[in-house]
Structure formats: C-alpha cells, structure tokens
Amino acid sequence: MKTILAFIIGDPLADGAVPSTGVSARLTVFVAGAMAFLAVFALALSLTAGRLADSWADDLAQSATLRLPADLDQTNAALRAAVNVLQTTTGVASARVLDADEQRTLLAPWFGPDIPVESLPLPQLIEILPDDTGYDVAGLRARLQAEVPGAVLDDHGAWREPLLAAAQRLRLLGWSVLALIGAVMAAMITLAAYAALAANAQIIRVLRLVGARDDYIARAFVRRFTLRAGLGAAVGTGLALLVLQSMPVADVVSGTITHFGFIGLDWIWPLAIPVLSAIVAFAATRMAASRRLKDQT
C-alpha cells in the first residue's frame, strides 16, 4: 500500500522532467479514453451475443418437436399412434399436440395473423418435453419410423450446435478485439512516451549532472503516463457505460433480446478496464523509457 501511495504522489523534482501538458499528455489521455470506450462496447457485444446464443441453445435443448404428415385422411390415425408411442417412451415427460391457434402464432411472422390454418394441409406438430433423465433419441426415432410412417422427430440439434459454435466464436472475437485494443493503446502510449523523452532531453541531462539515475528519471515518466492512462480509461469507461444505460431495451420475438450490456458478475469486466489500461501504460512506458534513456546516454 505504501509503495502504491508513493507511486501516486511521486517526486516533485523528478516530475519536472515530464511535461504536465502538451501533445504527449493529451494524446495519452485521449487514446486511453477512446480505447476504453471501444473496449466496453466490445465486451458488451461479446457477452450479450454469447448470453443470447446460450439461452437459445438451452431453450432448444429442453424440448423437441414431432411433425406428422400433412395428409388429412391419415392425420387422426397418425396422431393417435404418435401420442401412444410418446406416452410409452421412457424419458418423455409430456407430449402436447399444438392446436390451431398455436400453429397460427408460429406462422404469423411469415404469413400474417389471419392465415386459415384449419383449411390448409399443414403438418400436425407435437411438442415433446423430456424429464430429468431424458430419452433415447435414436430409439424413439426408430419406433416412430416403424409405427408412424412419415413422422419426423426434430430434437433441434441442427439449430443448437451452430448456436453453440457461434457463441464460442463471438467470445473469441470479443477477446481478440480487446487484445487488439490493448496493443494499439500500448503502441500509442509508447510513441507518446518517446516524444516526451525526446522533448525533455535537456532536462534529463541536467538531472543526470546532479546525480539522478536513469531508474529515478524513468519512474517519473512511468508514473505520469500510467496515471494519465488510468484517468483517460476511467473517463472513457464511464462515458461508454452511460451510453449503454441510455440505450433502449429491445424486445424481439417475444423477448429474445432483453438487455444489451452487462448483467450480474459481468460488471467486473468494464470496471477492470481502467486498471488494466493503467497496467498496459505502466509496462509500455517503462519499456520505452528504459530504451530511450539508454540511447540518450
């Protein structure tokens, strides 16, 4: 704690070698703020997309659909046979036949709310809910093929697996964007530190003449640039969070998307951005100061 406090307070004599204003100071604060602003939105997009894909995948995993042929002459017989198979299958908690209103609701996004489903040869749908143990999909599909010709069991695997893959890729993309943002910030702060060291070469020489060591001078630069980057990142993070909070809550397809941003423990990530930005600035400035001071020897 004492070391951190001493780092924040600094040394007035050494701080004189670091410009308190100028292009390098403004550039450091601006770059840190801009990168933090973008990092918040990259995090929000990644976490929200991953959360949404996981939710979809979980919903699809909790149910299956049995589709019966659209032959009106055989629908009743096929329906009775299918229900009997499902009721006698171990692992099936319930099998519910969708009525005309539910089918109309499913088709409304594509054909409108007034579609006459009663007069159309639409396939009969049965919603299947598994119990805690689950059922043998391959076995149930084989029984249905034997007892209910033309019935199609959809366990939503074709939808679930791409969603899970998409969630993983979106998370990887989010972390990649954050790594790129950190690299850009480190590069810009390094350039700003080089510029500040070059502009104050005369002051550095004077400090050396009075006995100041390079580590002593470097600490002053590292301190100033670290604090500037932390301040800029804090401002950028705060502005990004304000923008996120002001965004309207979307409600798409019965509440599929409910919140874009951070929920619960997700808030740890944006709050850590200023700290991480300061750490990046500390490492970049320390490396730049050490190299530049050696070149100026």
Image: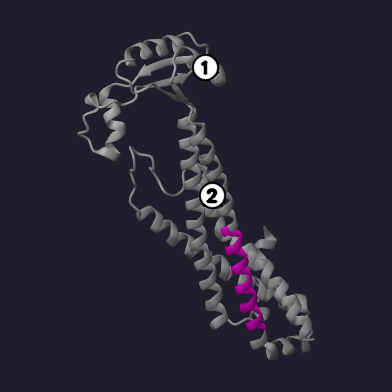
The residue under the point 51% across, 44% down is 50
Query: Residue 191 colored magenta?
Result: yes
| Residue 73, horizontal then vertical, whole percent | 30, 15
Q: How is the image coloured?
A: one colour
Instruction: Name the foreground residue: 38 vs 87.
Output: 87
The residue depicted at 26 percent of the width and 30 percent of the height is 104
| Above or below for 185 versus 108 | below
- Residue 224 in sight from this viewpoint: no
The N terminus lies in which quarter of the figure?
bottom right
Residue ID for mark 1: 140
Residue situated in front as seen by the camera: 6 or 148: 148
* Residue of label 2: 170
Left or right: 177 as drawn, with respect to 217? left
The rendered magenta stretch, by its main secondary structure, is classed as: helix
Is any part of residue 87 visible from this angle?
Answer: yes
Q: Amino acid at mark 1?
A: Leu
Image coordinates of residue 203 in percent, x first then y, are 68, 88
Q: Is residue 91 above or below residue 201?
A: above
- In the foreground, 28 or 211: 28
Residues at marks 2 and 1, CA–CA distance in whole angstroms:
34 Å
Residue type, label 2 = Leu
Instruction: Check residue 283 for magenta coloring.
Output: no
Q: Earlier in the sequence, mark 2 or mark 1?
A: 1
Residues in magenta? 177-197
Q: Residues within 10 Å of mark 2 (few under 14, many from 20)?
A: some
Q: Position of residue 22 (x, y in %)?
A: 54, 83
Left or right: residue 136 compared with residue 261? right
Secondary structure category for the residue under label 2: helix
Question: Which residue is nearer to you in this view: 290 or 54?
Answer: 54
Judged from the image, the secondary structure of the residue bearing numbered disc 1 is helix
Say which of marks 2 and 1 sits in front.
1
